[in-house]
Image: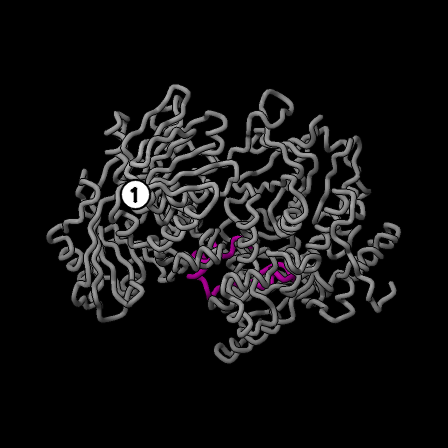
Amino acid sequence: MRICVIGAGIAGTFLAWRLRATPTVEVDLVTGVPGPDATAASGGGVRGFETHPEQRRLAVESLAELFGTPGLLDSAGYVETGSTYLMAGYDGLEDAVAEVEYVHPGSTQIVDHGTLRRLGWHGLPDGTVGVLEKRAGFIRPDHLRALVIDQLARATNSRVVSGPVLGLVPHSDGSVSCRTPDGTDRYDVVVVAAGPWTPGLLTGNALPADQYRTKAIQVAVHRVAGALPTMFVDETSDLYGRPTADGGLLLGVDTHRWSVQPGSSAPIHDLTAKAVQIAGERLPHLRLLETAHTVTNADCYADPPVLTLWSVLGSTHRLFTFTGGSGGSVKTALAASRTAANTLLGTGKNTRTTTSRTENKRMTIMEPGTRRSTGATALTRYHTIGIGAGPSNLSLAALYKNVTTEKLALFDSRPVAGWHTPLLYPGVRMQTGWMKDLVSLVDPRHELTFLNYLVTSGRLYALINSQFDSLPRIEYERYLAWATERLGVVNFSSRVDSIAITDDGFEVSVDGTPVAVSEHLVLGLGTRPVWPEYVRNLPSGRAFIADELGVRMPDLEPHKADPVAVVGGGQTGLECVLRLLGSGFTDIRWLGRNQWFRSIDDSPMANELYRPSHIEFLQGLNRSKRREMIVDSRYSGDAITPGGLRALYQGNYDGLLTLGRFPVTLLPGRDVTSSELLPDGLLRLNCSTTVTPEHHDVRHVVVAAGREHVQAPFSDDLRDRIDYDDDGEMLVEPDYSVRWKGMNGHRIYSFNASRYSHGLTNAGLTQLPVRAAIVLNSMFDREIYPISDELCAVQW
């Protein structure tokens, strides 16, 4: 399949880079007209918040990918400045900010006019509000673009072709010819991503371009005296700006000058002076000195303002545009290019086109001619499909890629890589050591070890010298994102809603549409928070699960002196208490059902429970005895990190010195049985205790009552074939295969769902590669990875 991308701005370059990752695709990137362009002129700002919903989604996902891919983050030269977005308040703003906060917890909040003034903003119209974003800043898009183009030029399935494009000719079979100074080539798909040159290129070839408009952009960099602001957008005055890496301030103001010729660099008179004037009114503490330099160019705009594929000729040809947006694609290019590449791969093979700028869907997996399943649709065939892209299935995929050429794919409902992202507060630590990564316990020379992640991302010495007793959980999530990017087998935004068995194997459906079929199936579905009955009658904004605490923090901020309850005596409950304590809350009630808040037993003997030899021992016991032993040893892992408890006690003592009382009250032995909303607006939690019943009246309730396993979406026929135990759980064999009727060579494997057959390592991270190796040995009926654990002093 041959694809041509016309335009080497940030959008076109990223699109070609995405497409090149598919070995069966050949990509030509045509660089276009030489000279400065919008990418070179861009301020490079990246943030999550945007007022347009689709643009906001793309910006949030792009930012998540940037932060989750250390190599990309470093190559982009990211500098964190924070962001301030000023505007008139509108209905739905809180929900919009919550979308950003959900992916980047603790980063975003809404502030009022008074707070903005205290932050240095003056002369704002009444009713102006601000969205403050901590995790925002700027990158070097021109530098990043150059690095990607260099990769494309050196790759075997991509070329960089010098432009400009001299002609575009659509053919009756849907293909398109593109003529450059080097000659004419015919492509299966052509994408025009030429920014402000797009309208002229289309109209010059008698193609429609009414939907696009060009507009002048101009920015200037000033030397300044005084404290620099964050990156900002002021919708009330059309002013925008950001600090520069050398301590200057980049300023611009909307030109409102449309239909300009691309490539023009003539400065617009008085525009720089206008920006300086507005900045003096809005930020009077700043003293702008001389202007270092001014950049003028043009960019391409469309309605709606979203960077997306747009079919030029409807459904008859595979000619698209990929430009537009609201000018400056840097904020959204990562996510938009991934969506566009996925759509093109489906389009090129199914002759499906996008006829609307808002019609793009998630990745299309269908490929005619691969193999037929039930019905008339041809589905991509894989040897193995994994449901879920958490650590368990990532470990399997990592080991899988080194031992077989068979195809494997993972399907995950999340839009980007992540791992308990809403709970990744600063200061949260792992409960397992760094050596227990995706691969090291069975293949320490694998390229996806945690140690290699540290070395290749340049973080090794910084982490070593930080002397962490326990690894920051955010670091582990970034390691998973790094590994995910290198594996390249995950289909994100793909919620599997049905798994059926057919003559060809397991048929997987996404959003009601069959998308793939496989010989074998691996379930890595993970868990979801438990929402107890005793709080379901409370207002959702006042009582919520721990995963929502980051999103809800702006609503809680005005009530720091009011009582707040955290229900749940485990690690998540502790982390919520620490988050509230660190944010200045002064009356926190921590309720737990058990008689004390237990910490993990990290002694050598307790760690013997997490060895392959102990898993093997458990398999030789009868079911009742095995369950008894697992229940007896559960607090070796299902408990709290000692360092976390120490941090709580120290923080609580610091609070005592300041307040004269402890800000956190620990309430073990309290089993919440019911709740009610009181007339004064407080929430009452009714508890049973070892002595007498009691109640606690609080303003908010954070529920951290544990997690439950997510059930696989089997079809009725397949579910009827599964063998279940007396508790209604799937019967899982020692090799993690599920016992079911009519296998016919097709196997189902299940991680995270066999606690009472495989012990405490069932759902934890300590034995990820060991479990994956056992599955691979079983799947391929040979010992690919030896599991050796003979030097054990304990005889079980």
**Quarter assignment of residue 187:** top left
Residue 342 picture location, percent across and down: 48, 37
* Magenta-drawn stretch contains 115: no
Q: In which quarter of the image is the C terminus?
A: bottom right
The local secondary structure at tag 1 comes to: loop
Instruction: Classify 647 as above or below 294.
Output: below
Instruction: Classify 513 as above or below 464.
Output: above
Residue 787 picture location, percent across and down: 77, 56
Q: In this view, does 782 lie to the left or right of 101?
A: right
Residue 437 picture location, percent across and down: 64, 59
Does residue 291 appear in the picture of this structure? yes
* Magenta-drawn stretch contains 549: yes
User: Magenta residues: mostly which secondary structure?
Assistant: helix
Q: Is residue 341 left or right of residue 487?
A: left
Does residue 680 appear in the picture of this structure? no
| Model colouring | one colour
Q: Is residue 225 left or right of residue 390?
A: left
Residue lying at 60% horizontally and 53% vertically, measured from the top left: 675
> Which is nearer the eye, 669 or 279?
279
Q: Residues within 10 Å of mark 1 (few under 14, many from 20)?
A: some
The segment highlighted magenta reads 547-575
**Quarter assignment of residue 180:** top left
> Which is nearer the eye, 17 or 73?
17
Residue 183 picture location, percent across and down: 33, 33
Instruction: Classify 215 as above or below 510.
Output: below
> Which is nearer the eye, 676 or 335?
335
**Quarter assignment of residue 767:** bottom right
